Image (cartoon, rainbow, N blue to C red):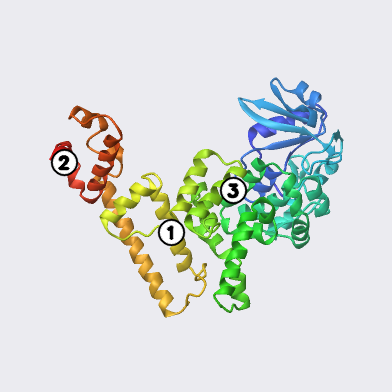
Amino acid sequence: MEITIELPQKVRVILDRLRQGGYEGYAVGGCVRDALLGRIPHDWDITTSAKPLETKSLFERTIDTGIQHGTVTVMIDHEGFEVTTYRIDGEYEDSRHPKEVAFTANLIEDLKRRDFTINAMAYNETDGLVDEFDGVKDLQEKKIRCVGDPRERFGEDALRILRAVRFSAQLGFCVEEKTKEAVRELAPTLRAISAERIQTELVKLLLSPNPQMMRDVAELGITSVVMPEFDEALERRRILSLKEGKALSDTEEKREDGRWFFNVACFCPPEKSIRLAAILWILGENAEKSAQRTLEVLRRLKFDNDTIEKTVTLVRFHDLRVEPEKTAIRKAIYEVGEERFPALLMLWRAELEAKESGKEFMAAGQSTGEKAVLCQESAQEKLRQIEKLYEEIIKDGDCLSLRMLAVTGRDLLDAGMKPGKEVGERLTKMLFDVLEHPEHNTKEYLLYSVFR
């Protein structure tokens, strides 16, 4: 059956110009894959038999993006398209970059060097789809499979090991067995990859429609390299279960390996910090240790400071106990932070929804019978009450922080208080009074309370 892809007009312009110049040109890689899946490609990459200088001669405006590796960015109406010469990669010396590249006039030689079959297809309107490695079949079978020998592909670029799992999560595919075996074998080579690139792949996976497939990162030995604290936490939980004398069936043993909480991320909004917290809160023996280890992991993986602060806060307060009562909720909001508390509610809600769906296991030693069901229903009702009261607190505009207090340090000084730490202590005391009695948050009442 002939396969047709609707190419964007600007892509057709580039391909036509290349053909008129006497060269081959094809849309290639992820854009072809996505088009065949009915997805809208983010970028349209083009491969050509034209060498970089030949490509440049055909277009009015180009940018030398990576000309030493054959890539020229062609600008069409202020939009850039990467056009890369067919190439053969030389020897890989750092598990990431080829020592050198050689240009070739053969499209198939270029496709051979690509990572997975679903990314090794090319298309133009003259020749149709070029699918030398059965990428269409793997799309139909929802399979991630390396082009050629997976050990060679991963040996060339170790980041492909993590990309295999990431693509499986983004597309909802499975990793083909030989490819999976090579992942397990070569996972240690990921040590040669920069923290920034590891972070990028992990985030893409976590924010995918299938974040629970982070479990494959653990099961295939990848976390032992990029996040060893995680493997340590899983082992610690397993040993704790044994010490508590819990006899585990084969099914329970599989659950106890830590895969259960990856499912929680499925119920979290696709927000980086919340999904990170959903899998990292188990890193320590208690909340503070988990927060400290989360900080260490995220710093090592070069996350930005804002993501680190948000995630560490959610982990630190993951086990916070809050009663469904407005004073308790206001104090919790103050402790966690006005901006972070809604995310904490989302995390709690995700965990309860995971349990409700049967995608979570009960903690070590806890019955999964009628008592556990009642506990689950009680927890659901309690959280619903907290969420409702939280909404009322926000709607009423209750004071939740020093910045919302009706008086400032300047007001206290103007009222006759001497400068010093007592001013800050007095403001904090006022705040805690207002958290219990929001009606006290008036300038008159608070200033009167200072001197009465």
Amino acid on which disc 3 is placed: Val
Binning the other alpha carbons within 10 Å of mark 1 as few (below 14), some (14 to 19) or many (20 upward) gives few
Left or right placement of residue 224 versus residue 439 in this view: right
Amino acid on which disc 1 is placed: Asp
From what the image shows, is residue 389 above or below residue 57? below
Residue 180: in sight, yes or no?
Answer: yes
Mark nearest the camera among 3 and 2 is 2
Binning the other alpha carbons within 10 Å of mark 2 as few (below 14), some (14 to 19) or many (20 upward) gives few
Q: Nearer the viewer, residue 179 or 444?
A: 444
Q: Nearer the viewer, residue 360 or 42?
A: 360
Mark nearest the camera among 1 and 2 is 2
Residue 253: image x %, image y %?
Answer: 61, 73
CB within 8 Å, label 3 to label 2: no
Report the quarter where the N terminus lies.
bottom right
Left or right placement of residue 216 versus residue 178 in this view: left
Distance between mark 1 and mark 3 Cα atoms: 20 Å
Nearer the N terminus, badge 1 or badge 2? 1
Residue 319: assigned label: 1
From what the image shows, is residue 346 above or below residue 442? below
From what the image shows, is residue 367 above or below residue 258? below
Residue 449: assigned label: 2
CB within 8 Å, label 1 to label 3: no
Task: Identify the residue position indicated by label 3 in the image.
Answer: 297
Residue 339: image x %, image y %?
Answer: 39, 44
Q: Secondary structure at mark 3?
A: helix
Amino acid on which disc 2 is placed: Ser
